[in-house]
Amino acid sequence: MGSHSGAPAEGEQRVPVEQVLNGLEVHALEPGETALEAFILLKVLDRDGDVAWSYRTTNRLSREELLGALTVQVDVLRKSLRDEWDD
């Protein structure tokens, strides 16, 4: 399985998210919540048919805020996996 940063080129045209996700589905937001920004981690098939990782972000996503959110998610995932291992 390949791995790469998958960042789009600076100034690359943005398109509606449904055009990128090709019919993939995500869980709905809770009632009363409104999406403001997004970081999307994508497992993709590249041009050569190899599995690779890519990511996309929305316009105004703060890198500092993203780092904090991803750090928390990594810690939660790590704890969850450790708890499963201990069981």
Image (cartoon, rainbow, N blue to C red):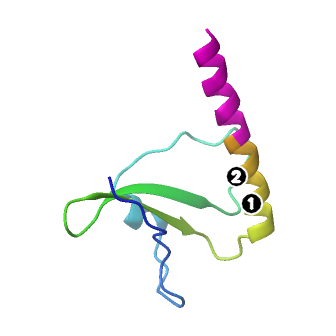
Q: How many marks?
A: 2
Instruction: Classify the position of the C terminus by image quarter.
Output: top right
Image spot of residue 51 (x, y percent): 30, 55
Nearer to us in this view, 61 or 15: 61
In the current view of this chain or complex, which residue is farthest to the left? 48
In the current view of this chain or complex, which residue is farthest to the bottom? 11
Image spot of residue 82 (x, y percent): 65, 23
Residue sitting at x 64%, y 13%: 86
Image spot of residue 17 (x, y percent): 48, 65
Q: Name the residue carrying label 2.
A: 70
Residue 77 inside the magenta-drawn segment = yes
Mark 1–mark 2 distance (CA, rounded to whole Å): 5 Å
Q: Quadrant of residue 19?
A: bottom left
- Label 1, residues with CA under 10 Å away: few <14, some 14-19, many ≥20: few
> Which element type, helix, strand or loop, lies under badge 2?
helix
Where are the magenta residues, as a range?
75-87
Q: Quadrant of residue 49?
A: bottom left
Residue 8 inside the magenta-drawn segment = no
Question: Magenta span: helix, strand or loop, mainly?
Answer: helix
Image spot of residue 71 (x, y percent): 74, 50
Which of the labelled discs sits on residue 33, or is there none? none
Q: Name the residue carrying label 1.
A: 67
Q: Amino acid at mark 2?
A: Leu
Q: Amino acid at mark 1?
A: Leu
Rendered view: 51 above or below 25: below
Residue sitting at x 69%, y 43%: 73
Judge left or right: residue 52 versus residue 34.
left
Q: Are marks 1 and 2 in contact (CB under 8 Å)?
A: yes
Nearer to us in this view, 11 or 51: 51
